[in-house]
Amino acid sequence: MNRNILSMAALALTLLVSSCTDDFTDLNTDPKNLTVDNLSQSEYGAVVKAAMYAPAFLPNSARGPFQLTQSLFSDIYGGYFATTAPNFDSDKFILVGGWLNGAFNYFYGSAAPQIKYAEDFAAENGYELENAMMKVWRVWSYHRITDFWGPIPYSQFGNGERSVPYDSQQEIYQDFFTTLNEAIPVLQSNAGTTSFLGSNDLLYGGNVDQWIRFANTLRLRLAMRVKYVDPALSKTEAEKSAAAPLLEANEDIASIATSAPDFTNPYNTITQWGEFRMSADMESILKGYEDPRVAFYAAPAADPDPSDDPSGVEFPYEGMRNGQSKVDKQGINFNALASDMAEAYTEAGAAGPAFVVMNAAESYFLRAEGALEGWNMGGTAQSLYEQGIVVSHEQYGLDGSNLSGDAYVASANTPASFDGTVPAASEVPVAFNAAGSKEQQLEQIITQKWISIYPNSQEAWAEKRRTGYPTFYDRLNTDNPAIPVNTVPRRVPFVDGEFTTNANAVNEAISSKLGGPDNGATKLWWDAKP
């Protein structure tokens, strides 16, 4: 955790923090001690803006950390992409410590201090509504970090000491629910109003009703995350959330608008580096389903193979298997054979698509899964599943037809061979299998959720670990003896910098909070499906 926090005066003006240092104490200084005595409401708004940009990787300074967090790890393990760079081995489950160190340090050096400052300053100055908003934002930001590592510094971050203890993931999730259940009533008591943050609230421009929907849907996501480890807690929090306003229509989507040149979509930078392409799993599923969303996700390959296209359908979108050998990556032009991201993500210097924090379709798939358990989700598993598909299609202006012009939700289509020779990894159909087992129906729900949340690979990887779905092709090779080709890493190891600057705390986390060796095979607390 080797980062320096700049003064909050500078933060309010520049919307950014971070410069490297060797002193752990600088990082762990309580941000409240860095306040500016006469910080005004408008200046506080700039701090909130920075606190929202940073964990979404939108400042241009976050391009490297985005690659080190998402592109090289969750994008690959979440199944959306495959690595084409010969010297990148994370697709073969080498969990490169230097990369992870950069990812961890970015969050704790840039995002976490701003989030804490924004929340604490609001509490100290009587901004009750804004404090509730920042509580919700803190939960969203940290749940992505604990779902990478498991135990992390959380409750005592900013304690001003030379060492900051780790919390167990169970403790962190319990606090997530406590925090949301404190914040949501405050939001509800302000329903119909607008925060003074205005445009500095990058999600909703201060619209409290939309924050209520976002907070409830986030609580629902986390409730389903703990389903296998604490079913009673999961049911309680899920039913509570489903009875409240959720993200239900596409105008409710929680997203942060991008802007050139300073806050562009990070994919618009890293696609220029030519280091990844669409995965074979994406091709297999989207091609088999004749899914029209593919045109919004991927570009036609420079050298497509029409021989395995669906009958009567042109499908120039190609994927590649993960785990290619270094020799094959050096000798085969995968960048031409497989698809890049869609044009919106590849235009150099453009603002690029908005960063989607959470979309409306996800809420239907979350409720559909709850309905499978017999919980009160306000609909049946089938009706909620089908509505999730409809809302996802509407997000892209689609009419609900597949590429053959047939009704997508009623289609019996299943995933296809990605290359015409290797069978599809799954036979899960689109049309809801009402006569199927609960497990078969769960695979359908998670597969469609996976499609709908693209390119949110951090969530996709978490759900793959939690449920086992979607079903992916095996890796061609693994270089990690602890992680076989037919699975994905369950977490990433703690980072080198912590063993240097926060050794007692990280070693205590390993011995008493992790539940296994500090490697990629140890399951997180919520990763408890039998």
Image (tube, rainbow, N blue to C red):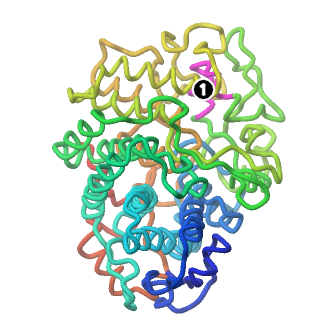
Of the pair 199 and 7, the residue shown nearer to us: 199
Residue 520 showing in the rendered view: no
Q: Percent position (x, y) of residue 459?
A: 47, 47
Q: What is the three-letter code of the residue carrying label 1? A: Leu
Magenta residues, dominant SS class: helix
- In the picture, residue 130 is in which quadrant? bottom left
Alpha-carbon neighbours of circle 1 within 10 Å: few (<14), some, or many (≥20)? many
Vertical comparison of 108 with 243: above or below:
below
- The foreground one among 86 and 325 is 86
Q: Position of residue 465 (x, y in %)?
A: 39, 47
Identity of the residue drawn at 79% across and 29% down: 304
Choose between 33 and 152: the one closer to the eye.
33
Please tell me in which quadrant of the rendered image residue 467 appears.
Answer: top left
Q: Is residue 389 visible?
A: yes
Where does the magenta region start and end?
282-294
Q: Position of residue 180 (x, y in %)?
A: 31, 53
Residue underneath mark 1:
286
In the rendered view, would you say 342 is above or below 482? Answer: above
